[in-house]
């Protein structure tokens, strides 16, 4: 296709050698943004929350679902990190470790609460052994 001559441009229209290639978007030398690992991020966040929560005496007993979720997401995040070139592997491992520590703390709180509850009943005896069975209180009376 030929263009009519442009008297204002030196050498006519189009310029000699053609038009330069169009510029791309963004700065040259930068590629696409690296893939992110959302599972690793979620594992780390849940692991930290469950670990911090497990340090509180009563709240720590309820942190085991968060700890299990952090462990599961940690394994899933490590698997995804292997597929996308290692992005987020450290966060996934961190979520896995903090989730495991929080789970151990939740188990420890459960054991402590069960032992404490059992000790409370041992210290208080409303019907000491006196050799007489009280049939109205046969469960509490050690003589029955």
Image (tube, rainbow, N blue to C red):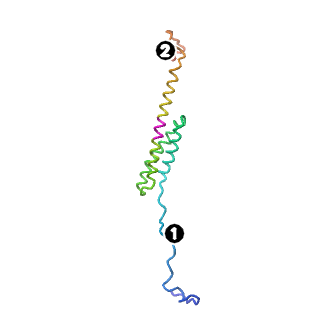
- Give the residue furthest to the right: 8
Q: Which mark is residue 50?
A: none
Q: How many marks?
A: 2
Please tell me whether residue 66 is drawn above or below residue 15 in the rendered image. Answer: above
Question: How many C-alpha atoms fall within 10 Å of the one at disc 1: few (<14), some, or many (≥20)?
Answer: few
Q: Which residue is depicted at the point 52% across and 41% down?
A: 52
Along the line of sight, which residue is nearer the eye, 105 or 133? 105
Q: The residue tagged with tag 1: helix, strand or loop?
A: loop
Question: Is 77 in the magenta?
Answer: no
Along the line of sight, which residue is nearer the eye, 77 or 97? 97
Does the CB distance between marks 1 and 2 fall below 8 Å?
no
Q: Which residue is depicted at the point 49% across and 48% down?
A: 44
- Give the residue furthest to the left: 82
| Residue 104 found in image quarter | top left
The mark that comes first in sequence, 1 or 2, is 1
Which span of residues is magenta-colored?
101-107
Q: Position of residue 14 (x, y in %)?
A: 53, 85
**Disc 1 vs disc 2: which is toward the camera?**
1
Question: How many C-alpha atoms fall within 10 Å of the one at disc 2: few (<14), some, or many (≥20)?
Answer: some
Q: Position of residue 141 (x, y in %)?
A: 51, 15
Please tell me whether residue 93 is drawn above or below residue 30 in the rendered image. Answer: above
Q: Which mark is residue 27?
A: 1
Question: Is 104 in the magenta?
Answer: yes
Which residue is labeled 2 in the image? 142
Q: CA distance from mark 1 to mark 2?
A: 85 Å
Q: The residue tagged with tag 2: helix, strand or loop?
A: loop
Q: Position of residue 115 (x, y in %)?
A: 48, 27
Please tell me whether residue 11 is drawn above or below residue 106 in the rendered image. Answer: below
Dominant SS in magenta: helix
Q: Position of residue 54 (x, y in %)?
A: 51, 38
């Amino acid at each position: 296709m030929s263009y009519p001559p442009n008297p204002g441009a030196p050498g006519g229209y189009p310029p000699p050698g053609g038009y330069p290639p169009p510029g791309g978007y963004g700065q040259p030398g930068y590629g696409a943004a690296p893939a992110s690992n959302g599972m690793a991020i979620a594992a780390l966040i849940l692991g930290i929350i469950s670990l911090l929560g497990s340090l509180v005496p009563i709240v720590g007993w309820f942190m085991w679902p968060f700890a299990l979720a952090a462990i599961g997401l940690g394994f899933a995040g490590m698997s995804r990190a292997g597929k996308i070139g290692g992005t987020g592997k450290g966060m996934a491992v961190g979520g896995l470790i903090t989730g495991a520590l929080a789970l151990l703390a939740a188990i420890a709180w459960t054991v402590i609460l069960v032992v404490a509850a059992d000790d409370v009943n041992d210290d208080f005896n409303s019907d000491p052994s006196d050799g007489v069975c009280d049939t109205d209180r046969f469960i509490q009376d050690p003589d029955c």
